Image (spheres, grey):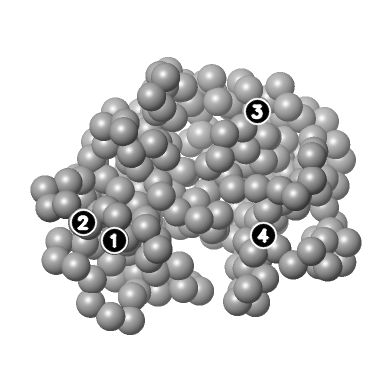
């Protein structure tokens, strides 16, 4: 098994190229690990498992929700393991992501808490609702008319992704009211922020908050490292979890980095 040099970030121009490189290097190692200290949930995605989730959800965006390269999807999710999955899915087919509802978008991906805000006005963007239950299962009750239940939609999607067109470094990846950033720009910023050691990061930062997308998600992955995301973090758990997860870097929302 080949080990990635953690001091040399992977020179990938696009997210699909990065993921393909990670799959060649060490497909079985952990890539995204998620804890919810309020529920006791722990979910771990290896590189190959993450890639499978990305493929299924990219196909869901294309086939179920009719998104096309260049479209924008609004992600309104808490700091959950599905966030990196949907980012990877969107970027794998040339779809940009936003967290700003004022940016024009065709699809909303949200959790149960945000669902009422996105279904209050009829005629808006298509809504894909995620239950956020373990294993991404369906909602236990009926959803509003027209809302797609993620837990019902993803299992039937193909494990094989064939993008409608090649994804390039100039394709938009992030859309904001002040402009967009391409895949190449985001990855270049990540390469400029290497982490020490193996690049394994433990954090309760939300990956979609300003600055954390690059520093707390893309930088570890580009470095051949991995990320451990924590939601509802128990303050007493940090030292134990850092040792258990062999984290080189710990970044906490209640402390300055």
Q: Quadrant of residue 141?
A: bottom left
Q: Secondary structure under badge 1?
A: helix
Q: Tell whether label 1 touches label 2 (CB within 8 Å).
A: yes
Q: In the rendered image of this protein, does residue 70 appear above or below residue 162?
A: above
Residue position marked by numbered label 4 in the rendering: 230
Q: Residue at x 49, y 51 (%)?
A: 83
Snapshot quadrant of residue 195:
top right
Q: Nearer the viewer, mark 4 or mark 2?
A: 2
Q: Earlier in the sequence, mark 3 or mark 1?
A: 1
Residue identifier under label 2: 120
Q: Residue at x 71, y 22 (%)?
A: 192
Dividing the picture into quadrants, the one containing residue 150 is bottom left
Residue beneath label 3, please?
190
Q: What is the spatial separation of the Cα atoms under label 2 and label 1, in whole angstroms? A: 6 Å
**Eyeballing the image, is 125 above or below 100?**
below
* Mark closer to the observer (3, 4): 4
- In x, y percent, where is residue 242? 84, 59
Residue 39: give x, y in percent of width and height: 60, 76
> On the image, numbered disc 1 is attached to which residue?
116
Furthest-bottom residue in view?
140
2 or 3: tag closer to the N-terminus: 2
């Amino acid at each position: 098994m080949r080990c990635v040099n953690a001091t040399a970030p992977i020179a990938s121009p696009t997210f699909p190229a990065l993921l393909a490189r990670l799959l060649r290097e060490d497909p079985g190692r952990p890539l995204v690990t998620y804890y919810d200290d309020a529920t006791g949930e722990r979910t771990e995605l290896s590189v190959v498992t993450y890639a499978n989730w990305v493929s299924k959800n990219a196909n869901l965006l294309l086939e179920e929700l009719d998104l096309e390269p260049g479209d924008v999807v609004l992600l309104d999710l808490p700091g959950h393991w599905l966030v990196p999955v949907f980012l990877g899915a969107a970027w794998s087919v040339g779809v940009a992501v936003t967290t700003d509802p004022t940016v024009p978008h065709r699809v909303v991906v949200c959790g149960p808490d945000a669902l009422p805000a996105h279904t209050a006005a009829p005629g808006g963007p298509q809504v894909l609702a995620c239950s956020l239950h373990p294993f991404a299962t369906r909602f236990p009750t009926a959803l509003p008319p027209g809302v797609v239940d993620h837990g019902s939609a993803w299992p039937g999607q193909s494990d094989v992704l064939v993008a409608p067109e090649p994804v390039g470094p100039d394709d938009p990846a992030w859309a904001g009211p002040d402009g967009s950033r391409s895949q190449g720009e985001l990855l270049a910023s990540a390469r400029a922020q290497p982490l020490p050691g193996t690049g394994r990061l433990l954090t309760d930062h939300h990956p979609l908050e300003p600055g954390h997308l690059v520093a707390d998600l893309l930088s570890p992955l580009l470095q051949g490292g991995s990320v451990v995301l924590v939601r509802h973090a128990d303050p007493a758990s940090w030292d134990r979890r850092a040792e258990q997860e062999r984290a080189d870097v710990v970044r906490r929302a209640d402390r300055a980095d």
